[in-house]
Image (spheres, grey):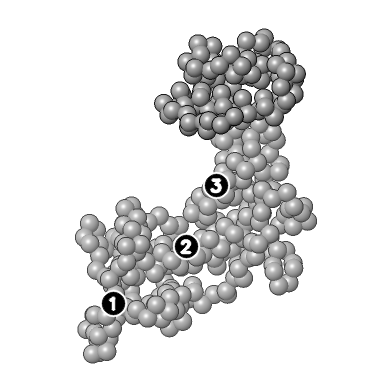
Amino acid sequence: MRNSLIGHDSPLDRLRSRTRETVSKPGGSKSARKNRGALKPLSDREETLLSEILAKPMDYIDSDEFRRKRAEQTIYALEEVQRPDVSWYRPLMDDILPSRSRNMNARTGKTLVLSGEQERILFLKFNYARFRIREIQDKLGSARPSIEMAREMLNWHGIADQHRRQIAETNLALVLAMAKRTRMSELDFADLVSEGNMALLRSVDKFDCGRGFKFSTYACRAILKAFSRQGMKFSRYRQRFPTDFDPALEKSNHLEMLREQHVSESAAEVRHVVINNEADLSDVERMVIHHRFGIDSKPDQASLTLEQVGQLIGVTKERVRQIQNKALEKIRGVLTDVPPEPQAVSEN
């Protein structure tokens, strides 16, 4: 496992110190054997990640630097490349400013553009971490790794993922630049940005810094090809499903229809009770109900008010209200099978 090449201040050494889990050499001192035996078992999340790493051979871009003496110390002793500020990256926000369409450094406010040497350093560190994972995979074959080997693979995977993310974040502006240049009005801008981000990550995995080209030259072409594939996929989809999306069709009025149906059925039942006088209404009560609620009137004919009904039968509107309430109580009793409350008999 080439533990002899682990530098004293390498990223792997720092990560192990941070988690307080030291990988010891076979044999060694009593304290080393104690530390080796104190390795914690993997958590569920780490087990899942380890299974994903072991599912297929780790792919990496090879370099002669990886097989030189003290390769890890040499590679990770190279210049630390400044991490970008990605707080500006809000491609779907309306307030994005054209002047901030490139990666900006939060402290200096200057555009962060990596030189060819800085890109080479990042890609060497990224691919060396993947190279070390592949070494362990080749050594294991189909065997199950020990806790020590599993920890080392997870540590190297974390280092590789960190540098992969840094390279992608530094070049996020390429995605926006290519998306704005693409003349595909039928495609949603969010879909273009999403497809461009995926193409950028694939470019990071496949780029060979040893050829001497800038990463942007390779990534821009890959992003444009991804946009072209997305456009062709959308065209085939439109040919199969020519109907445009209508948001109104996505709204359901099922509850409103059920409510209207219930009201209509209830009104029909009340009308039936009144017309057939199943509530045993008096002539005056039937007249008040008919005129107040338009039972026999035409659909466009309005019902009468309390005062109008009172003038029609020769009583006050307060008396009409009393007669109406009494009649409604009788109708309600028929509909709910509850007999109306007995009325107090006047001594007069």
In the displayed structure, 137 sits above or below 241; it is below
Query: Which image quadrant for residue 284?
Result: top right
* Label 2: element kind: helix
Give the x, y percent position of residue 29: 25, 89
Residue on which the image places disc 1: 39
The label shown at residue 292 is: none
Residue at 22% x, 62% y is 144
Q: Dot 1 surroundings within 10 Å: few (below 14), some, or many (20 or more)?
A: some
Give the x, y percent position of residue 278: 47, 15
Of labels 2 and 3, earlier in sequence is: 2
> Closer to the camera, 168 or 119?
168
Q: Residue 247: in sight, yes or no? A: yes
Which quadrant, please, contains the C terminus? Answer: top right
Which quadrant, please, contains the N terminus? Answer: bottom left
In the displayed structure, 144 sits above or below 291; it is below
Of labels 2 and 1, earlier in sequence is: 1
The amino acid type of the residue labelled 2 equals Asp
